[in-house]
Image: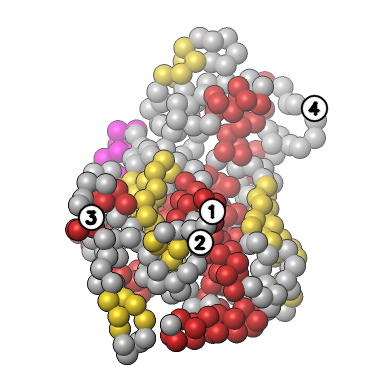
Amino acid sequence: MVRFLTAGESHGSALTVIVEGLPAGIPIDPRAVARVMRRRRAGYGRGGRMAIETDDVEIVGGVRFGATLGAPVALRIVNRDYERWREAMRTDGPRPPGDAARAVTRPRPGHADLAGALKYDTHDARDVLERASARETAARVAAGALAAALLGELGVAVTSRTVSVGGVAAEEFADERFDDLVALPDDAELRCLARGEVDAMIAAIDGARVRGDSLGGSFEVLARGVPPGIGSHVHWDRRLDARLGAAVMSIPAVKAVSIGEGIEGAAAFGSAHHDEIAYDAARRSFVRPTNRAGGIEGGMSNGEMVRIRGYLKPLATLPRPLSSVDLVDKRGFPAAVERTDTIPIVAAGVVGEAMVAVVLADEMLRKLGGDSVRETRRNLEGYLAQLREF
């Protein structure tokens, strides 16, 4: 099983992540890891925190001479902003007095502050929000970079695109333009291919920022090269769409998920929605002229591109805060204000890539096995030969 565990707080000294289950022999390029971390920091609508952090990833263990060992891989990302928060986030006691503790007692509507304070019996919501912060996703992206390295050895590539920002939606995307998305610069303002779409989305973001507001949006993660038969129909927790849906839904601020044209399909007739089947004799494979199913049928990949969308709510921290109630004296106050983004839609897509890569890496290994990547590749070649002979 490929899985990861993260630890660390938004303004703590560092984020750490341990990735388990990767076979030996996967080449790990630090430049590729740095690139995906840089992409997470990019995007129009981001706030000031990204100007502070560099998100340099230190490989602590599990890699030797540029390749995985088959052991757990440990990674560490230093929080540069910690120097400003050292007193408030110290791990030893006693608690500093007064404002030095930077306590948060006025929970933000839409955030984890109140529910977490009630659950963990604390009147200082900072105990909750530091871990609930999307800063944790930097560790996920580092883990996803390792999973993506394995997928690359197996012929699978993952990328993402911006689907909508507020009421501005991108045009429908053809699977054939996958490489155009991959070729977008790391610092792309928004992951759209049409300049007009980017300009309209930027205008919407600027409008929200001027009003002291946040903005919702949606992104899509695409995975090319996933062979048919990944996942299973036999149990609810083995279904590939269920696993991917849970992974993307776990991203902070994501409130809905759709596979392919899942939402549109709810208003369609079956005759207009399902992807007809044809056979390509030259390739000796079954093909589809459309991909409304998003590459998954019956809980299993069908050989088409896997496509999954995440729908991002407007962020809960507002420069012009909503009404709230103080946790201590129960009086009404404006909610607390923390540093935030107007919309982190590009970053959300990159985090989505990481989560999808981890699930696909796990499912590929579940199907193919292998303690070394060479063994896994050999097993994949045998499976692909079986499909051609079908």
Q: Which of 369 and 224 is in front in this view?
A: 369
Which SS type dominates the magenta stretch? helix
Q: Quadrant of the N terminus?
A: bottom right
Q: Mark 3 points at which residue?
A: 270
Question: Quick one: SS at disc 1?
Answer: loop
Q: Earlier in the sequence, mark 1 or mark 4?
A: 4
Q: Mark 2 points at which residue?
A: 232
Asked whether, in this view, residue 308 is left or right of residue 376, the answer is left
Amino acid type, mark 1: His
Q: Residue 260 carries which label?
A: none
Q: Earlier in the sequence, mark 3 or mark 1?
A: 1
Q: Earlier in the sequence, mark 3 or mark 2?
A: 2
> Mark 1 to mark 2: distance in Å?
7 Å
Mark 3 nearby-residue class (10 Å; few <14, some 14–19, many ≥20): few
Rendered image quadrant of residue 170: bottom left
Q: What stretch is highlighted in magenta?
A: 203-212
Q: Mark 1 points at which residue?
A: 235
Tell me residue 178's x, y (percent): 34, 71
> Mark 3 to mark 2: distance in Å?
23 Å
